[in-house]
Amino acid sequence: MRILITNDDGIHAPGLAVLERIAKTLSDDIFIVAPESDQSGVSHSLTINDPLRLRKISGRHFAVKGTPTDCVIMGVRRLLDGVKPDLVLSGVNNGQNVAEDLTYSGTVAGALEGANLGLPSIALSQAYGPVGHDEAFWDCAETHAPDLIRKIIAEGIPQGLIINVNFPACRAVEVQGVAVTSQGRRDVQTVTVEERADGRGKAYYWITVARENSTPVHGTDLAALAQNIISVTPLKLDMTDEQALTRFARVLR
């Protein structure tokens, strides 16, 4: 089985090394094509106004000066010698990708681009503790991902779908199970723009997002992680809302 690995945290991210070790339990035919630098929050963006720079790190490790989407395209169309991968793995992201995070996530987008190219694709993210990014529970993802991926592959991923996997912020031995979930939504999301000044007194700005959820809805990705349960959410490329389609079709004739 040929596996293409990417991420959005960058070629030197610890989660990428974790994912490579996970992939090696499944196959010895692995290619890694990841962004040269951190691309968190770029979503499914594609670089079309600048050239893509490719750097060979070693063996089958490559860095692209671009987005996760660029990396998957570069890997499939340029680096794999015309032999498509059997599986695309994106991650392991340092931080969960659930609820409205999915619209921003470069990790999820890497898998979406794999699906866009007709390839079975899985996004993997590891939630971290209240201290922040430095309190990552990498052993949780590394321990549970191989068996989970095997089961997903055995079941099969339909065309146009990806599987979004999130591991809870706990040690591997503390995981309480696996749940197939729907995409949740937080109660509160506040976006603010903070103004600062550089050394010359000129203004610059940081966008910050405060996210809270006091009552995660049962059956959602948020609820699963809150209970130390691995969340597995099927997502699809087709964003059509069928109910709204029918409703508007009746009035817009």
Image (cartoon, rainbow, N blue to C red):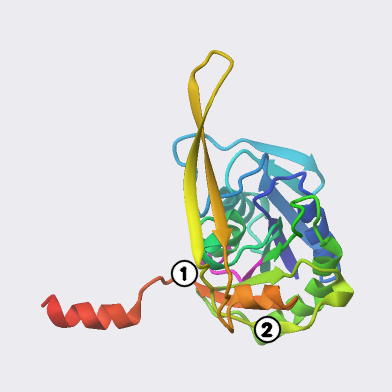
- Please say if 152 is above or below 198: below
| Residue sitting nearer the eye, 165 or 196 | 196
Residue 187 in percent (x, y) is at: 50, 68
Residue placed furthest toward the front: 214
Helix, strand or loop status at disc 1: loop
- Please indicate whether residue 244 sits to the left or right of residue 83 in the image: left
Amino acid type of the residue that numbered disc 1 sits on in the rendered structure: Leu
How dense is the environment of label 1, judged by Cα within 10 Å: few (below 14), some, or many (20 and up)? few
* Residue 40 seen by the camera: yes
Residue closest to the far right: 173
Residue bearing the label numbered 2: 179
Identified at 62% across, 63% down, the residue is 97
Marks 2/1: CA distance? 22 Å
- Point 48% across, 54% down: residue: 190
The numbered dot on residue 73 is none
Whole-percent x and y of residue 241? 35, 76
Residue 62 is left or right of residue 82, and the answer is right
Can you say which quadrant of the picture contains the C terminus?
A: bottom left
Earlier sequence position, callout 2 versus callout 1 = 2
Whether 155 is drawn above or below 159: the answer is below
Span highlighted in magenta in the image = 113-123
The residue beneath circle 1 is: 237
Is 115 magenta? The answer is yes
Mark 2 burial class by Cα count in 10 Å: few <14, some 14-19, many 20+: some
**Relative to 27, is 64 above or below?**
above
Q: Which residue is at a point 59% across and 69% down the rendered structure image?
A: 119
SS for dot 2: strand
- Residue extending farthest top: 200
Toward the bottom, the furthest residue is 155
State the image coordinates of residue 28 (x, y, percent, origin top left): 84, 64
